Every structure is written in structure tokens, then in C-alpha cells.
Amino acid sequence: MSRISIFLPESINEYIEKQVISRNLKSVDDYILELIQQDQSFGQDLEPLLLDGLDSGETTPMAPKDWEHIRQTVSVMVENDRSR
């Protein structure tokens, strides 16, 4: 395993410390590792979905109710992610 050093503003450092505590992590290293793993997963999961969407056929106009449904779904996903 390799080691890196970064310099952060105090406000960011305080935020990270709060995240470590709120997520019940052992260390800042665990928090950074978690963020990187989430980023990798997001990229790996998102690309096939985007390609599927592009290949899914004819498009249909989005109605306001469609956008509201999307907003609600994303809000639930964000809340679920925060509660982990």
C-alpha cells in the first residue's frame, strides 16, 4: 500500500473529521478510501446505464411530473446514502 500526503484548509479538515465521526469510521484514511471507492463505483455503474439509455429507442418529451418524479427519486437516494 502506498502513502500520499495532502494539505487541506482547516475548514475542510474539520468537515472530514465530522464525517469520520458521523459515519463511524476508524480514521480519515478510511473516509478518503470510502470516497474513492464510491467514485470508482459510480463511474463503473453509470456508464453502462447511460449507454443503455442512448440505445433504448425513440425519445419522448419530459413532462413536469416526470421531472418531479426524478427529483423525488434522487432525494430518496441521497438520503439513503447519507444514512449509511
Image: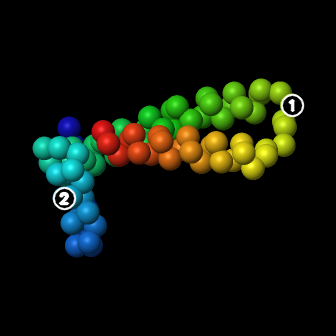
State how far apart marks 2 and 1 are (Cα): 48 Å
- Determine the residue positioned at 28% across, 43% down: 33
Regarding residue 42, the answer to whether it shows in the image is yes
- Does residue 44 appear left or right of residue 82 in this picture? right
Quarter of the figure with residue 60: top right
Q: Amino acid at mark 2?
A: Glu
Q: Position of residue 51 (x, y in %)?
A: 69, 31
Secondary structure, mark 2, is helix
Seen in the image, is 27 located left or right of residue 76? left
Residue 36 in view: no
Secondary-structure class at tag 1: loop
* Mark 2 lies on residue: 17
Where is residue 61? Give x, y as percent: 84, 43
Q: Is residue 68 above or below residue 57?
A: below
Q: How is the image coloured?
A: rainbow
Q: Quadrant of the N terminus?
A: top left
| Point 21% across, 58% down: residue | 18
Which residue corresponds to the image point at 47% horizontal and 40% vertical from the top-left? 77
Q: In the drawing, what numbered circle is on residue 58?
A: 1
Q: Identify the mark nearer the N-term, 2 or 1.
A: 2
Q: Could you say which is closer to the camera, residue 10 or residue 83?
A: 83
In the image, taking residue 29 as reference, residue 43 lies left or right, namely: right
Q: Is residue 46 left or right of residue 13?
A: right
Work out which quarter of the rendered image holds the C terminus and state it.
top left
Image location (x, y in percent) of residue 8:
26, 68
Q: Quadrant of residue 5?
A: bottom left
Name the one closer to the observer, 44 or 84: 84
For image coordinates 71% across by 32% down, the residue present is: 53
Q: Amino acid at mark 1?
A: Glu
Few, some or many residues within 10 Å of mark 1 (<14, 14–19, 20+): few
Q: Tell me: residue 56, above or below residue 76.
A: above
